[in-house]
């Protein structure tokens, strides 16, 4: 072989190696794009509303039971509770006029209890208007004219506490737009209100609930376990972040400028307990041994890996299977089937297998090495729920609470001012907290507005001692 042939072969081998390298890069890119194309709410952090009709999550096949729809034989029915007699407007006793068997009219009561049928309706809402006349009097001594001042507790606006609270309930809890509120008040209550008046009612309520909301924020900082999450918010076209910190009976919201460590510290305040979050780097300042990262997030990532080919899919499938075993054990613990001691014993080998697979994935899947490395950096925060009673393995508590805020953001497109943002975060706090405590939101808002007018102590958002003990 002459020199020319050797050079040609070397050139071809180099070209072949370059083409192989390009092919490997292209295949990796194709796999990455296919993975992104297959992303949905089940294998990523995407919300269910973003799922495309052609890319819905794969559900487990449902095996037909062969039974008819609806309640089955032996199923305990659910009926509406009867209203107590002292709450009824009218009671009408109806007796049969003739015997259904022979037609006789000679009937006497048989002493059995009557069948009670109650119909509930709402009367037409008729608003009332109170007028306060501030008279002026002239002084006989100096001739000066003095006008009377509004009595304490008299609203300075055009609407009373119930109307003001109802506006806040509609916009802040039921996500009705300002124009919708105007129409509803007109149609349902016969009250005319301008768009500006709707905004003033919101601001009035915001000021009235500021103190209870601050009390709730202070209260959560002293809990043993706290779930925290965050999502985007818009204020006058500026991107802000809405944070939520939640417990079993109290949830507080903050609208802050950034998604950062500084803002996370502002949300947590003096909190020193177990912090449940996702793996956002802004929480790195908090001791890893006092954290619990969300296994629902991890499971979605393992599911996405399992849908890939090759070694990535194999490792992902094993991690997914082990995670499902873990959740099965967790549910058995919650149902009382397993004791805490048994749960810990069965979790030990399972957790070791998961950590081993994470190291294996870091070594054998270069494209996802960073993801596996991030999971391993949170290794000390993976199993806190096994060690500490009362700590959940997921951050679902915070994610559920933030959903209402996300829906409100989609309907309203955010807020237009700092005052509007304060109103939203306070109303979200009131709504989420009272819902958990099974308390009436409208009653609370009316009480807060009354307290503001009369300069008295507003109602509290803190749970009763019985609820606190149960938590």
Image: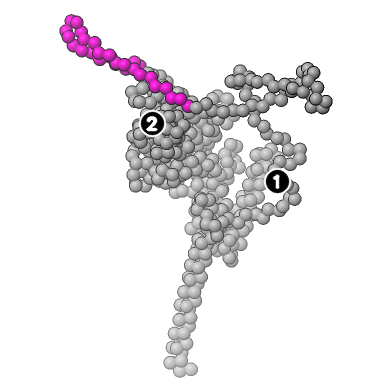
- Residue 280 x %, y %: 46, 48
Q: Give x and y (percent) for residue 189.
A: 45, 29
Mark 2–mark 1 contact, CB under 8 Å? no
x%, y% of residue 219?
47, 30
Furthest residue in direction bottom, as rendered: 2
Instruction: Indicate whether residue 460 is drawn in magenta.
Output: no
From the viewer's side, name the closer residue of 239 and 471.
239
Q: Residue at x 39, y 27 (%)?
A: 208
Q: Where is 212 relative to 231, above or below?
A: above
Which numbered circle lies on residue 225?
Answer: none
Q: Secondary structure at mark 1?
A: loop
- The quadrant holding residue 177 is top left
- For the point 74% across and 22% down, the residue is 97
Residue that label 2 marks: 192
Binning the other alpha carbons within 10 Å of mark 2 as few (below 14), some (14 to 19) or many (20 upward) gives few
Q: Please count the marks in the image.
A: 2
Left or right, 470 with reference to 177: right
Residue 60 higher or lower than 4, as above or below: above
The quadrant where residue 425 appears: top left
Magenta residue span:
125-152
Q: Is residue 225 above or below residue 328?
A: above
**Magenta segment main secondary structure:** loop
The picture places residue 186, in percent across and down from the top left corner, at 42, 32
Question: In the rendered image, is residue 268 in sight?
Answer: no
Q: Which residue is mark 1?
A: 69
Residue at image coords 21%, 10%: 138
**Callout 2 secondary element:** loop
Q: Residue furthest right?
A: 102
Comparing 354 with 218, the one in front is 218
Q: Residue at x 18, y 5 (%)?
A: 141
């Amino acid at each position: 072989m002459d020199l020319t042939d050797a050079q040609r072969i070397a050139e071809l081998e180099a070209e072949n190696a370059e083409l192989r390298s390009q092919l490997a890069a292209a295949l990796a890119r194709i796999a990455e794009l296919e993975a992104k194309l297959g992303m949905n709410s089940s294998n990523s952090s995407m919300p269910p509303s973003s799922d495309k009709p052609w890319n819905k999550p794969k559900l487990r096949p449902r095996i037909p039971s062969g039974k008819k729809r609806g309640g089955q034989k032996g199923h305990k029915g659910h009926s509406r509770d009867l209203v107590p007699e002292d709450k009824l407007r009218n009671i009408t006793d109806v007796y049969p006029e003739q015997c259904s068997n022979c037609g006789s009219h000679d009937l006497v009561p048989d002493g059995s209890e009557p069948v009670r049928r109650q119909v509930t309706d709402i009367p037409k809402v008729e608003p009332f208007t109170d007028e306060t006349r501030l008279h002026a009097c002239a002084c006989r001594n100096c001739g000066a004219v003095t006008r009377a001042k509004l009595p304490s507790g008299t609203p300075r606006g055009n609407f009373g506490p119930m109307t003001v609270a109802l506006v806040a309930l509609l916009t802040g809890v039921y996500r009705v737009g300002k124009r919708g509120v105007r129409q509803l008040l007109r149609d349902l209550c016969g009250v005319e209100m301008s768009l500006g008046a709707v905004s003033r009612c919101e601001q009035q309520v915001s000021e009235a609930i500021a103190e209870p909301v601050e009390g709730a924020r202070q209260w959560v900082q002293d809990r043993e376990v706290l779930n925290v999450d965050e999502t985007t918010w818009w204020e006058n076209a500026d991107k802000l972040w809405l944070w939520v910190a939640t417990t079993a009976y109290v949830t507080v919201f903050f609208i802050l400028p950034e998604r950062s460590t500084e803002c996370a510290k502002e949300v947590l305040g003096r909190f020193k307990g177990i912090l449940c979050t996702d793996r956002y780097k802004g929480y790195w300042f908090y001791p890893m041994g006092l954290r619990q990262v969300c296994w629902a997030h991890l499971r979605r990532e393992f599911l996405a890996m399992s849908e890939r080919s090759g070694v990535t899919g194999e490792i992902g499938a094993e991690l997914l299977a082990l995670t499902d075993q873990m959740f099965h054990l967790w549910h058995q613990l919650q149902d009382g089937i397993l004791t805490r001691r048994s749960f810990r014993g069965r979790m030990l080998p399972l957790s070791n297998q998961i950590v081993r697979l994470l190291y294996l994935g870091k070594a054998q899947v270069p494209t996802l090495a960073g993801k596996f490395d991030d999971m391993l950096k949170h290794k000390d925060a993976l199993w806190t729920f096994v060690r500490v009673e009362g700590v959940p393995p997921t951050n679902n508590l915070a994610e559920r609470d933030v959903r209402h805020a996300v829906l409100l953001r989609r309907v309203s497109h955010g807020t237009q001012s700092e005052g509007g943002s304060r109103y939203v975060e306070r109303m979200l706090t009131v709504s989420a907290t009272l819902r958990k405590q099974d308390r009436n939101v409208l009653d609370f808002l009316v009480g807060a507005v009354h307290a503001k007018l009369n300069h008295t102590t507003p109602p509290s958002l803190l749970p009763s001692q019985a609820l606190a003990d149960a938590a």
